[in-house]
Image (tube, rainbow, N blue to C red):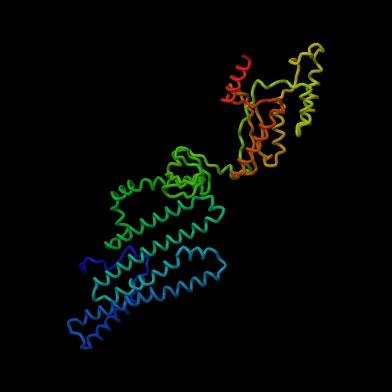
Amino acid sequence: MPAEDIPTSNPALSGIPVVTEQWEAKTSYLARELTIWVENHNWVPDRLNHSVAIVILLLGLFATASFLYFICRPLILKAVTRIVKKTEFKWDNELLGQGVFRWLTHILPGLLIYLASPGLFSSVPWLGNLLSVTSSIYILITGYFILDSILNALQSILSRTPAGQKLNLATFTQVAKLIAALVCFVLGIAILIGESPLSLLGGLGVFASILMLVFKDVILGFIAGIQLASNRMLSQGDWLEMPSYKADGDVLEIGLTTVKVQNWDKTITTIPTYALISDSFKNWRGMSESGGRRIKRSLRVDTNSIRLCTDDMLNRFLEIEHITEYLDAKKKEVEKVNARLDESRRENRVNGRGLTNIGTFRAYIEAYLRHHPDINQEMTLLVRQLAPEGRGIPIEIYCFSSNKNWAAYESIQADIFDHLLAVAPEFDLRIFQEPTGLDFQTLVNESLTQA
């Protein structure tokens, strides 16, 4: 590169410490003295005096930078590690673990070259400017990795706080890294061409349009991530169910462009972040944060087994736990209502009021659930009869298990229905079931026997 084409200063690095007049004067003085020393010795030809001096200065500069990198840098890191381990703070351990201090020490050799090269090589402007530009790029890249490490440390620190667990920190971290990378890219171009970053950005209209197309998913994901985080629609660790993407499991990671879900079969489903805004999904966080997990299932009672209770039936039912008080109260209520009827009309059981086996069974189910140790009694609990649809009378149980763990929840639900299916015959009820091959075989055998 010709000397006149290489910038003498870097407007993009106006924030980085520049060479002061005193420092430049000292380095220039050192370069002159070295040149004079070489000229006073006749061990090189006169025409090479200046070149030899420049080579010595260049080797000395790189030797000093290498000393800082290979000797001083490990010593500094060792001292910082010792100090961090002695402190009671946790955040400094994260900074150390994420490599913040390690990247900070990378600046030392680059900063030395950036500060010393203009004065040492003032007689060779193109070389001084070349070293200055190269060291500026090195400092810029190092600065990006410092910021990257700080963001990782902040995410790790904040993720342990209650507020941080509710926010999608990964999305904000990735957005910050993307913005930092774009800024570093613009600054790097500005350093290489020697222009101000602001003037460079003014001519990037077409380039920005191309970026919009290239980073379409990133932009959509960024907007979706902000909406997800601000509205608390989804957080890491939530149970997400999204049938359109066949996702049903725990959210492992919410990224800038994708969301990773580990399904219950341990497979991983990747969902575009913006799809969580455009499509519908179910978040089970409300259940996890509530006091129970819903049980909603029905028993279907055979309609042909429903009948009014006789005195013998009621006497048997009185021996069943949990419904004695219910039966005593109902019997008094029924007797009170039926006492108003004429004696001739009382003989017909259709007249007046009477208890049914299905109603008594429904009362037993509710009483059984009220005394169940694994059912949350502070949440909704009801037993209702649904409309028949030709497959028996549905008796729906609606309650909440106090244990929200999936395995325990399924066990509790199964135990409840195992018991209810087993005791239904005690109320002279049959559970409805579609005819099976055994039923048809029994009918055939009975027909043959009668024949």
Quadrant that contains the C terminus:
top right
Q: Is residue 33 above or below residue 416?
A: below
Residue with the most extreme bottom position: 41
Q: Say whether residue 434 is left or right of residue 175.
A: right
Residue 231 placement (x, y as % from top left): 51, 44
Residue at the spot 23% in from the left edge and 88% down from the top edge: 41
27 and 354: which is toward the camera? 354
366 or 194: nearer the viewer: 366
Residue at horizontal 68 percent and vertical 25 percent from the top: 429
Q: Is residue 128 visible?
A: yes
Q: Quadrant of residue 432?
A: top right
Residue 389 seen in the current view: no
Q: State which quadrant residue 48 falls in.
A: bottom left
**Marker count (numbered):** 0
92 shown above or below 62: above
Task: Give the residue at x 48% y 64%.
Answer: 97
Question: Where in the figure is residue 360, as x and y percent of width and height?
Answer: 72, 27
Q: Quadrant of the N terminus?
A: bottom left
170 above or below 192? above
Q: Position of residue 31 (x, y in %)?
A: 28, 80
Q: Is residue 449 left or right of residue 266?
A: right
Percent from the top left, x then y, of residue 361? 70, 28
Judging depth in this view, the residue of 259 and 174 nearest the camera is 259
262 lies left or right of 419: left
377 or 409: nearer the eye? 409
Residue most extreme to the top: 344
Specify the quadrant of the image occupied by residue 365: top right
